[in-house]
């Protein structure tokens, strides 16, 4: 098993005790997030962007890479019953996106879970979570898709999937509109 890396600044292995039970549940919920979202309502996925870039410090530390190492980035937005709910950012070394993680380039509008949860060679690190803020690279993407006028806190989690020694970092940010749906779902 791949040794788990030290935390990047701001990421915590536990949820802040002051958060609601819904926050605590969703920020540490195991398994495929898309399966959980589908239990709340009709889930749709839209690809926001896919591109090659140099990995920023925060994410480099999370994957054990050198800063500016070439990576493949995929950013998506998931909605539940038409409400923008979760923005996600996945990245892997560029060479791995042509090798062990090449499936990330062919997903189109399918969720990443389609390639992660049916392969016994894949191992997942424990979750870490935080309230997103600048300069975390994912913060700008989350703010860009956040509903206008909705300035609620952006809570995110991330973990690293490992396959044959190659990392795939997956970060998921729950938008403020999501928490209303989650609270309604838990009341059913």
Image: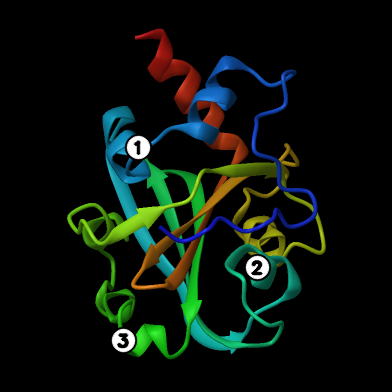
Q: Position of residue 44 (x, y in %)?
A: 31, 51
- Residue 171 vs residue 81: left or right? right
Say which element carries label 2: helix
Task: Name the foreground residue: 125 vs 83.
Answer: 125
Q: Mark 2, mark 1: which one is toward the viewer?
A: 2
Task: Name the foreground residue: 100 vs 132.
Answer: 100
Say which element carries label 1: helix
Query: Which corner quadrant of the image does residue 131 belong to?
Result: top right
Judge the density around disc 2: few (<14), some (14-19), many (≥20) Cα neighbours within 10 Å: many
- Asked if marks 2 and 1 touch (Cβ < 8 Å), the reply is no
Separation of marks 2 and 1 at Cα, in angstroms: 25 Å
- Asked if marks 1 and 3 touch (Cβ < 8 Å), the reply is no
**First-in-chain label (3 vs 2):** 2
The residue under label 3 is 99
Quadrant housing the N terminus: bottom left
Judge the density around disc 3: few (<14), some (14-19), many (≥20) Cα neighbours within 10 Å: few
- Name the residue located 51 percent from the left edge and 44 percent from the top edge: 126
Task: Name the foreground residue: 79 vs 74.
Answer: 74
The residue under label 1 is 37
Q: Position of residue 30 (x, y in %)?
A: 39, 36
Say which element carries label 3: loop
Task: Name the foreground residue: 53 vs 116.
Answer: 116
The residue under label 2 is 59
Quadrant housing the C terminus: top left
Separation of marks 3 and 2 at Cα, in angstroms: 20 Å
């Amino acid at each position: 098993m791949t040794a788990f890396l030290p935390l990047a600044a701001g990421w915590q292995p536990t949820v802040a005790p002051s958060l609601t039970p819904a926050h605590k549940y969703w920020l540490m919920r195991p398994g495929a997030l898309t399966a959980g979202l589908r239990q709340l309502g009709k889930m749709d996925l839209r690809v926001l962007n896919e591109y090659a870039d140099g990995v920023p410090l925060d994410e480099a530390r999370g994957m054990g890479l050198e800063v500016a190492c070439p990576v493949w980035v995929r950013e998506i937005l998931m909605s539940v019953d038409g409400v923008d709910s979760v923005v996600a950012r996945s990245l892997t070394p560029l060479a791995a996106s042509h090798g062990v993680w090449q499936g990330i380039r062919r997903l189109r509008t399918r969720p990443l879970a389609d390639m992660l949860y049916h392969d016994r060679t894949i191992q997942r690190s424990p979750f870490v979570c935080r309230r997103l803020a600048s300069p975390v690279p994912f913060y700008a993407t989350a703010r860009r898709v956040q509903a206008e006028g909705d300035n609620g806190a952006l809570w995110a989690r991330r973990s690293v999937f490992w396959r044959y020694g190659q990392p795939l970092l997956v970060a998921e940010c729950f938008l403020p509109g999501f928490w209303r749906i989650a609270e309604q779902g838990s009341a059913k």
